[in-house]
Image (tube, rainbow, N blue to C red):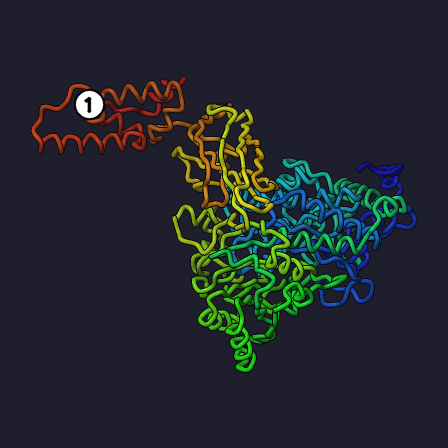
Amino acid sequence: MGVKKVDIKKIISQMSIEEKASLCSGLNNWFTKPVESAGVPSVMMTDGPHGLRKQSGSHDHLGVNLSEPATCFPAGCATAASFDAELLEEVGRAIGEECIKEDVSIILGPGANIKRSPLCGRNFEYFSEDPYHASKMAASHIKGVQSTGVGTSLKHFAVNNQEAYRMTIDAVADERTLREIYLAAFEGAVKEGKPATVMCSYNRINGEYASENEWLLTELLRDEWGFEGFVMSDWGAVNDRVKGLAAGLDLEMPASGGANDARIVEAIKSGTLDEALLDKAVERLLRAIYELRVTPEMKKNHPCDMEAHDGAARRVAANCAVLLKNDSGLFPVSKDLKVAFVGEFFEKPRFQGGGSSHINPYRVTSALDCMGVFPNARYAKGYKINSDDTDDALLAEALKLAAESDLCVIFAGLPDRIESEGYDRKHMRLPENQNRLIDEISRIQPNAAVALHNGSPVEMPWIENVKTVLEAYLGGQAVGAAVMDIISGAANPCGKLPETFPLRLQDNPSHINFPGDGVKVEYREGVFVGYRYYDAKEAEVLFPFGHGLSYTDFEYSNLNVSSDDVSDAETVTVSADIKNTGNLTGREAVQLYVAPKTKGVLRPVKELKGFVKVSLEPGEVKTVSFTLNKRSFAHYDTELADWRTVDGVYGLQIAASSRDIRLEKDIVVHPAEPYNVELTVNSPVAAFMSNEKGRALAMQLLEGSPMFARKETESNEGSKADENDGAASDGLSDMFAAMADEIPLRALGMFSGRVITQEELDAALR
């Protein structure tokens, strides 16, 4: 962006230690502090991330008090389901325009935390269980907002995957798990999106609070990833302010009443804190303040049209909804049918989550408002949102209406009281009165459908008894209209699940380690999060990651790869043709997975490494392409302290979901730089095979062992032994052949009648 005609270093040189320290905490709940003597202005930040929550009256950070009207776009759980980077940028630009209208310089979001468990109360704000997907969605959102000149604050950095004990819990995870899953979502967003600020989380990470974790905030974020903005705390996340400043925490939010500012001053004067660290923090803060302050020019260049934004919210919501099931083509529904709409969410849609992201919507359009599209439709309440208990009168009315109709669409989901910031869900079930309503209607009405409004997966005990399920997620202020657009066929569903829907809560890999004991939570499942776990276990799921149906059909063909034998220093281009073979215009989210097929490192069966959304007219064919690089094939090697590619075979899978692989081709990838492992007499033979001198020694020992050589001899000369002797012989040779790669060199030497010492090995490898 570039600071506009302001000499930051000169301003800092003219400020006292007290003035500089004062900039390191908020003026109040939402503003940075001004320094009048130095001409430093104050700028405003507000909650997001899926809309503007600007409070003009009483301030709070939990969405309790009312805020200015703003467009409530679909929440992160929904926009992630679009698998559409361009759509996220469009939403971001609209949010940026509303920020400028309200003189807001920084909006807090997006949230890139991984969905480790379906129970996390704040999952509705987050994008995905997959770090690549989450990073792309977050980067696109950031670029959209910041294209208007407004800053974003990528949050909550890092490993903040639960609400229980969120201000003190210690998230314990090994570095590989952190690097490949929980940090990777932020890494991609920082490098590609370049957010103006990053917000640190409340929790501890391996014993250290995020707000004072130098490895996290400086060594990783700034030195390794190249982040150039400032780091702010989550509201109330500061533990030790002086330690935090030294670690890289620039701004404490909200106001501390001056107490922590004084501690900074005292530490500098006592010599326990280097003033140069304070100057760095102030420089980063001032650069952002001057770059991001709202100007008349910004207002002129980015006019805000609230009516247009409302229309965009409706279109975006329709692009995010996921058609999970549609037996017999029940949807779209013919307008001349007698349709029963049931469920209180039909008239009172659940369109956003509770807590700091709770927006005062500019307008709310319910499905009831749009019921006129079906002239023969009627509505019955069916249940009460604010209760889990069945109201017998409401149930009877709904059953009667369903029985008298051609089909019934039940609007169901999770109420605010179940899903909110501040606490986690206790289970994955819908309220009991809703489950009972769906079950009883499906028994008397064969054409039953369910439209869901929820921010994270739910169990579906009635799934076999209903024909259609539409996951609308928390689709923003126009979700009612968007759902009716899909039901009527005015819009063709094209969303895909950004998370796995397990059959039951107990199937989730984090189940026995969530949310911890109140002191710490251990991430024992490691890198096996979401579909990575379910695929490795070959477990049945309700709906897989990436799943989503359409009213049309798509054919995948003509997979092409730029090379089938490459170095990981090269890029690989993958392309395929996608054809709309149906009768309706549709959009398809095409996914690319990389499946390591060479043993040596414990890895997921496959991982998402690319996706693209393509729009196709009936009969139209388009070519989609992806570019893969070293990170597409690498895993994080903690001994090497870097990303490493194992030399071997990798499957490139073009897919409609993580469990619907349409095309596949294997390629061989070699590391550009050989991986030099320290070889000892206890290293397995397989480790020696990647070292030229080590391979020669291992082969010499293998050839000198009659047990390992026997199978090759038999295959060359044939066995003259009788049937029984031959069976025993083959069994022995198979066993030793299977052991060959895994046996340590010292044991191989023993089988060859030769003892190998470490000194002899070192000499052979020189």
Percent x, y for residue 598?
40, 33
Which of the two residues, 343 or 635, is positioned nearer the viewer here? Answer: 343
Is residue 638 visible to the viewer in this orientation of the structure? no
Quarter of the image with the N terminus is top right
**Extreme left residue here?**
722
Question: Residue 249 or 445: which is nearer the viewer?
Answer: 445
Q: Can residue 711 be seen by looking at this rendering?
A: yes
| Vertical side of 31 occupied by 63: above or below | below
Give the x, y percent position of residue 524. 46, 51
Instruction: Estimate how packed mark 1 is, as few (under 14), some (14 to 19) or many (20 or more) residues with alpha carbons within 10 Å.
Output: few
Task: Name the residue beneath numbered marker 1.
Answer: 715
Residue at 61% x, 69% y: name it.
377
- Residue situated furthest bottom in the rendering: 393
Residue at 52% x, 74% y is 404
Residue at horizontal 63 percent and vertical 53 percent from the top = 491
Whether residue 231 sits left or right of residue 428 in the image: it is: right
* Total labels drawn: 1
Residue 275 location in percent, x, y?
Answer: 77, 42
Q: Position of residue 403 (x, y in %)?
A: 50, 73
The answer to whether residue 192 is above or below residue 233 is above
* Residue positioned most to the front: 336
> Disc 1 residue type?
Ser
Name which residue lies at 78% across and 59% down. Answer: 54
Q: Quadrant of the C terminus?
A: top left
Rendering quarter of residue 613: top right
Q: Decide if residue 626 is on the left or right side of residue 198.
A: left
Determine whether the residue tagged by mark 1 lies in a helix, strand or loop: helix
